[in-house]
Amino acid sequence: MVNIGEAKAHLSELVDRAAAGEEITIARAGKPVVRLIAYQESTLPKRIPGAWKGRVRVSRDFDELPESIAAGFRGE
């Protein structure tokens, strides 16, 4: 654990240590406030716009709220 003042003075060193795999906790007044960890690229596949085109249909009455449900929201 490193206090915030020390982290300001040694930021480059702390970044190098985090990049090497170390997890560094930065504290304020002795209480942990943040963790400094290495950045990792996402392992999720890239999103492709339009991938669901033609596979999803939205009903014509999608925006219409049935009266029975609207009454429930009004507490009736």
Image (cartoon, rainbow, N blue to C red):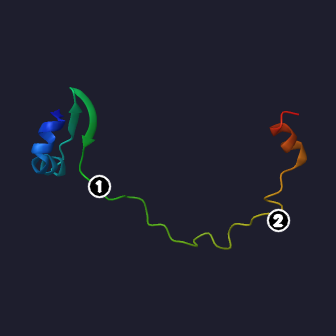
User: Percent from the top left, x then y, of residue 55?
Assistant: 68, 69
Residue occupying image coordinates x 23% and y 31%:
28
Q: Position of residue 54 (x, y in %)?
A: 68, 73
The secondary structure type at the circle numbered 2 is: loop
Gap between marks 2 and 1, in whole Å? 43 Å
In the displayed structure image, the side of residue 48 where residue 17 appears, left or right = left
Question: Which residue is painted at 18% across and 37% down in the image?
Answer: 4
Asked if residue 10 is positioned above or below residue 32 in the image, the reply reads: below
Taking depth in this image into account, of 69 and 9 the one nearest to the observer is 9
Rendered location of residue 17, percent (x, y): 13, 47
* Label of residue 2 in the image: none
On the rendered structure, is 6 left or right of 45?
A: left
- Of 72 and 45, which appears nearest the observer? 72
Q: Write down the residue under mark 2.
A: 60
Q: Is residue 30 above or below residue 4?
A: above
The amino acid type, in three-letter code, at marker 1 is: Gln
Direction top: furthest residue: 30
Which quadrant holds residue 74? top right
**The C terminus appears in which quarter of the rendering?**
top right
Q: Which residue is mark 1?
A: 40
Q: Position of residue 30 (x, y in %)?
A: 21, 26
Which amino acid, by three-letter code, is at mark 2? Arg
Crowding at dot 2, Cα within 10 Å, few <14 / some 14-19 / many 20+, comes out as few
Report the front residue among 51 and 33: 33
Q: What residue is at 15 percent from the left and 41 percent from the top?
A: 7
SS at circle 1 = loop
Q: Earlier in the sequence, mark 2 or mark 1?
A: 1
Placement of 52 over or under 23, stated as above or below? below
Q: Residues within 10 Å of mark 1 (few under 14, many from 20)?
A: few
For image coordinates 84% across by 37% down, the residue present is 72
User: Front-most of 4 and 48?
Assistant: 4
Quadrant that contains the N terminus: top left
